[in-house]
Image: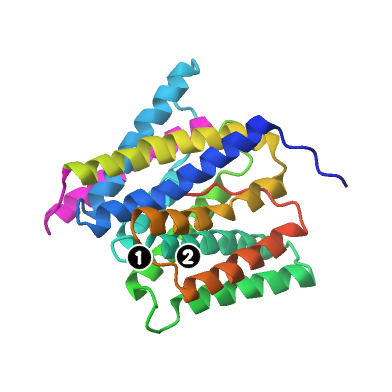
Amino acid sequence: MKQPRIRIGTIALTGLAMAAFAANSVLCRLALSHAAIDPATFTLVRLASGACVLCLILSLRRKPEPSGGSWPASVALFAYVATFSFAYASLPAGTGSLLLFGAVQTTMVGYGFVRGERLSALQWFGLTIAVAGLAALVAPGAMAPSVAGACLMLAAGVAWGAYSLLGRGITDPLSATAGNFLRSLPIAIGLSLCVLLFGTNLTAIGFACAILSGAVASGLGYTIWYAALPGLTPAQGASVQLSVPVITALAGALVLGEAISLRLSISSLAILGGIALVFGSRESAPSRTS
């Protein structure tokens, strides 16, 4: 069946959303690699600023109060943001984004399989390649990422996959996202209070990066993504997210001076190519990303 033509406006919105999602990784790594803020404070500021922007957008839409979301989704959102922040204390931006993306998509495909969805031989091949790429990326070696950081980012991917699954079928995703951001704030405050016992760190640069991550890359990013989604088929919405780890790696090299190693390049081809094979032969609902 011939795919419908994508409008220029949808392409522009999609590009902006993917850039915003990639910016989350770059901003978090920029702040934490320079010890400009601690991960718990980054988590709290990101969620708080994101909630403020989302509620402001809802008010401009003449819907002043978030009416959606749930506590399970809010816990999954908090788990994603917290583990994401702690992971970037030791992971390069490109590596972290690739691990996150691979874990998100593997989680969602795995959930579908458990629920009775069956994969074709080509899809199994793609999933095997993607998992092998993840294994190669974290395998011991001179260029291997931090084990603790990799485990935290994989956990972040599982949490975001769960959050995406919990959000399936929601008729007003923007309102639900705002509600989930608000519900996650008490948990984030509790984490920050616990970390106070070990000492916190906060500078103006770190605070600014956290606000930009929450308000612009998350709050505005999700708003733009939800505006673009109606113009995309499910497969297009899922496939376009393959660009996020690539954008992140390039931005990490340009902004943070991170090297794009041979290990990262080969793993990227395996993970992104494998996932493209999985989504290329079925119409799968698009997941929301970082």
> What's the residue at 47%, 46% (across, down)?
21
Q: What stretch is highlighted in magenta?
A: 174-203
- Residue 70 is situated, as x and y percent measured from the top left of the image, at 47, 40
Measured Cα–Cα span from mark 2 to mark 1 = 10 Å
Extreme-bottom residue of the structure: 141
As drawn, 143 above or below 53: below
> What's the residue at 53%, 45% (across, down)?
18
Q: Residue 93: which quarter of the image?
A: bottom left
Q: Nearer the viewer, residue 211 or 64?
A: 211
| Residue 99, disc | 2
Examine the rendering and report whether any part of residue 39 can be seen.
no
Q: Nearer the viewer, residue 180 or 120?
A: 120
- Residue 129 is situated, as x and y percent measured from the top left of the image, at 64, 74
Extreme-top residue of the structure: 62
Q: Which of 228 and 59 is in front in this view?
A: 228
> What's the residue at 49%, 75% (across, down)?
262
* Amino acid beneath label 1: Leu
Few, some or many residues within 10 Å of mark 2 (<14, 14–19, 20+): many
* Amino acid beneath label 2: Leu
| Residue 91, disc | 1
Examine the rendering and report whether any part of residue 286 can be seen.
yes
- The answer to whether 243 appears left or right of 218 in the picture is right
